[in-house]
C-alpha cells in the first residue's frame, strides 16, 4: 500500500477532488488521521500529518511501522522566484534541504558540516542537510504517472516560513533552492534511510518573503494540486493508456 501524505485536510481534499474522492469533514482526517481509500482501483492510505517537520516525521514513523511500500507527499509551497516558478505551477522535488541543522553564523545561516555529525549515511554517503531525490524513478516504482511537463526543482523545508524578503534572499543564495515548504525534508529523509520510494509534488501558492495579498493565491494552488494529483494517481503514462 502507498501512503498519500498532506500537511492539512484542506490540501488532502484538494488532491483527491479530481479523482472524485470526497473526504469526510470533521475529525476523521484532521492532524494525525489516516483513512483507507480507493483511487482508480488501487488502495491508498490517505494521511494528514499536520504542519511542520516534527509532525511529518511522527507520521512517517507510523507509516513505516505499517509497512507502506511508498510515500507520496502532496501540498502547496512558496516560490523564491515567481518568474521561474509562478503561482499555480506544478513541481516535483529533485532534492530536499533542511537549512536549520548545523552551526549558525552571524547572519543566521547554518553550516551542517561544522557539527561534524551527519544526520545519517544512506548508501554509504553522508547526509548533512540535503537529500537527493529521483521523482521519475520513484514514481515509476510506485506505479504513478509523473508528468514530464511538470517542473523539477530543489526544495527547502523550514520550521518557520520566511515572511521577510531579506531572509528569503539569504536562504535562496545559501542553498540554491526554488521552493519552500514545511514537511518535505522529514519525509524525504526518512524514506531515504528506510529505502522506501518517495515522491513530493507541490503547487505554488505564494512568493516566499512576501505577505502582500497579490503575491498569494492559495485557492489557485489548491485547484492546480487537484488537477496534478488526478494525473499522478491515475498511473497513466505516455506508452500506456492506464497503469
Image (cartoon, rainbow, N blue to C red):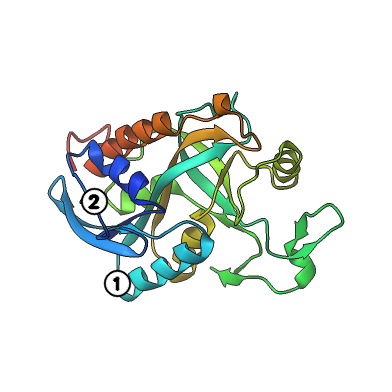
Locate residue 229 relative to residue 96 in the image: left or right: left
Tell me the number on the disc at residue 173: none
Q: Which residue is mark 1?
A: 67
Q: Which residue is mark 2?
A: 25
Identify the element where label 2 is drawn. loop
Q: Quadrant of the C terminus?
A: top left
Q: Residues within 10 Å of mark 2 (few under 14, many from 20)?
A: few
Q: Residue at x 52, y 46 (%)?
A: 94
Compared with residue 231, is residue 22 higher up or lower down, i.e. above or below? below
Residue 34 at x, y percent in the picture: 27, 62
Residue 26 at x, y percent in the picture: 25, 55
The residue positioned farthest toward the left in the image shown: 41
Frontmost of labels 1 and 2 is: 2
The residue positioned farthest toward the right in the image shown: 106
Locate residue 157 relative to residue 175 in the image: left or right: left
Depth check, front residue: 192 or 86: 86
Taking the image as drawn, is residue 201 in sight? no
Q: Residues within 10 Å of mark 1 (few under 14, many from 20)?
A: few
Residue 7 at x, y percent in the picture: 41, 53
Q: Residue at x 24, y 39 (%)?
A: 17
Amino acid at each position: 500500500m502507498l501512503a498519500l501524505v498532506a500537511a492539512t485536510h484542506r490540501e488532502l481534499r484538494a488532491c483527491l477532488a479530481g479523482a472524485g474522492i470526497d473526504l469526510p469533514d470533521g475529525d476523521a482526517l484532521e492532524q494525525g488521521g489516516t483513512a483507507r481509500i480507493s483511487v482508480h482501483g488501487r488502495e491508498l492510505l490517505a494521511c494528514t500529518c499536520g504542519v511542520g517537520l516534527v509532525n511529518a516525521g511522527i507520521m512517517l514513523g507510523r507509516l513505516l511501522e505499517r509497512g507502506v511500500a511508498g510515500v507520496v507527499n502532496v501540498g502547496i509551497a512558496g516560490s523564491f522566484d515567481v518568474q521561474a516558478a509562478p503561482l499555480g505551477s506544478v513541481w516535483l522535488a529533485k532534492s530536499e534541504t533542511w537549512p536549520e541543522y548545523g552551526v549558525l553564523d552571524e547572519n543566521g545561516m547554518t553550516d551542517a558540516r561544522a557539527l561534524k555529525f551527519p544526520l545519517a549515511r544512506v548508501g554509504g554517503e553522508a547526509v548533512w542537510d540535503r537529500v537527493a531525490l529521483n521523482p521519475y524513478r520513484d514514481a515509476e516504482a510506485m506505479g504513478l504517472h509523473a508528468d514530464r511537463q511538470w517542473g523539477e526543482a530543489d526544495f527547502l523545508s523550514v520550521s518557520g516560513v520566511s515572511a521577510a524578503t531579506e531572509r528569503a534572499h539569504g536562504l535562496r543564495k545559501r542553498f540554491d533552492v526554488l521552493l519552500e515548504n514545511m514537511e518535505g525534508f522529514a519525509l524525504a529523509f526518512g524514506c531515504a534511510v528506510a529505502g522506501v520510494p518517495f515522491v513530493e509534488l507541490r503547487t505554488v501558492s505564494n512568493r516566499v518573503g512576501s505577505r502582500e495579498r497579490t503575491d498569494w493565491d492559495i485557492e489557485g494552488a489548491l485547484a492546480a494540486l487537484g488537477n496534478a494529483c488526478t494525473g499522478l494517481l491515475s498511473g497513466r503514462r505516455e506508452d500506456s493508456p492506464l497503469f
